[in-house]
Each structure stands twice: as C-alpha cells, then as structure tokens.
C-alpha cells in the first residue's frame, strides 16, 4: 500500500490501536490498515509494544502514535463529521459519548481518548453558507445546543 503524501498524526497515551478499531467500527470508509510495534524500548514503552497504527477515518488517512503522557489532546484539533439527518447525527454522537466520551456544546464532543469531534448536520453548514438572517437564526439556535437538533436548525432557517 503506498504511503500517502499527507497523513494526520494523532497522539495517544497508549491506546492508539483501540481508538483506531473503534473509529473503524463507527464510521463508514474507515479501517485499520496496520499496527506497528516498537523495535526497541522508547520513552513511553517497551520493545514490542504498539508504537503506531495506520488507519483511515471517513476517508482520511491517519497515524495513531502511542507517545505517552507528554502531550494531551485539545479542541485545537477535531474531526468534523457531516451528517444528513437526525438519525445519523444521533448515531455518531451516541457512539462517541456513549463509549466513555463526553458532550460539549454546539455539536462538539470528545471520545474516551480525548479526541474532539464535531458532529455537524449538513443543514447547519448550509445555513451558515447562506449567510444573512438565515445564518444568524441557525447560529443562535445552535449556540443553545449540545448535540445538534436538526429539526430546530431547520425551523430556525425558515424563521
């Protein structure tokens, strides 16, 4: 398999493989391609421990690095997953939050490894792109939400 020109590298303390397998179960066009073990001891592990995992999340190539506790996840990086309806929004939100993750606001949540996700219905993105009063109404509605309520966003768009 050719090495992609650009790959997102995500730092995990020690559970990159578990995270990659979870994402592969939840999101379409996702998979675990390879698990690489350390050829020698390293600062946060021993020879033979999982060091990196090559995986794909919704078509985006990633590498999970088991780097230890030196760095933490932050909202400065997130995956944004576009959804078509409330059922799809609920499915992804519930999978992430219900598997040890946590809710945030405005469609954001974190998985149990601290990686941030934006579960964003297309209707919200379309409202923002429309601009003007439609965008303002949708934006104000979103600001009151944790998980995005598609019907409420659609109602706000209509005014």
Image (spheres, helix red, strand yellow):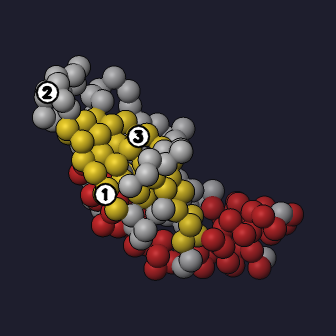
Say left or right for 137 vs 111.
right
- Which corner quadrant holds the C terminus? bottom right
45 is higher (above) or lower (below) than 155: above
Task: Give the quadrant of residue 129.
Answer: bottom right
Q: Which residue is mark 3?
A: 10
Task: Give the quadrant of residue 36.
Answer: top left
Tell me the CA gap for discs 3 and 1.
14 Å
Q: Nearer the viewer, mark 3 or mark 1?
A: 1
Residue 61 position, x and y percent, is 45, 52
User: Which residue is drawn at the image coordinates 48% and 62% (left, top)?
Assistant: 59
User: Which residue is drawn at the image coordinates 29% and 40% (left, top)?
Assistant: 52
88 is higher (above) or lower (below) than 128: below
Q: Which residue is mark 1?
A: 32
Assign a secondary structure to mark 3. Answer: strand
Assign a secondary structure to mark 2. Answer: loop
Q: Alpha-carbon neighbours of circle 2 within 10 Å: few (<14), some, or many (≥20)?
A: some
Residue 37 position, x and y percent, is 20, 38
In the image shown, does 143 or 68 lie closer to the viewer? 68
- Which corner quadrant holds the N terminus? bottom left
Assign a secondary structure to mark 1. Answer: strand
> Number of callouts in the render?
3
Tell me the CA gap for discs 3 and 2.
20 Å
Residue 153 position, x and y percent, is 65, 72
Q: Which residue is mark 2?
A: 46
Tell me the CA gap for discs 1 and 2.
22 Å
């Amino acid at each position: 398999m050719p090495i992609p020109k650009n790959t997102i590298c995500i730092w995990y303390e020690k559970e990159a493989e578990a995270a990659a397998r979870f994402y592969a179960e939840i999101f379409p066009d996702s998979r675990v391609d390879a698990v690489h073990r350390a050829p020698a001891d390293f600062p946060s592990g021993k020879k033979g421990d999982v060091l990196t995992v090559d995986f794909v999340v919704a078509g985006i190539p990633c590498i999970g690095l088991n780097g230890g506790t030196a760095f933490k996840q932050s909202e400065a990086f997130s995956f944004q997953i576009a959804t078509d309806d409330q059922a799809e929004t609920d499915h992804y939100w519930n999978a992430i939050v219900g598997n040890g993750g946590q809710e945030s606001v405005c469609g954001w949540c974190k998985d149990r490894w601290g990686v941030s996700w934006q579960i964003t219905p297309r209707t919200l993105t379309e409202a923002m792109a429309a601009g003007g009063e439609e965008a303002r109404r949708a934006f104000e509605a979103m600001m009151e939400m944790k998980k995005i309520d598609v019907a409420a966003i659609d109602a706000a768009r209509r005014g």
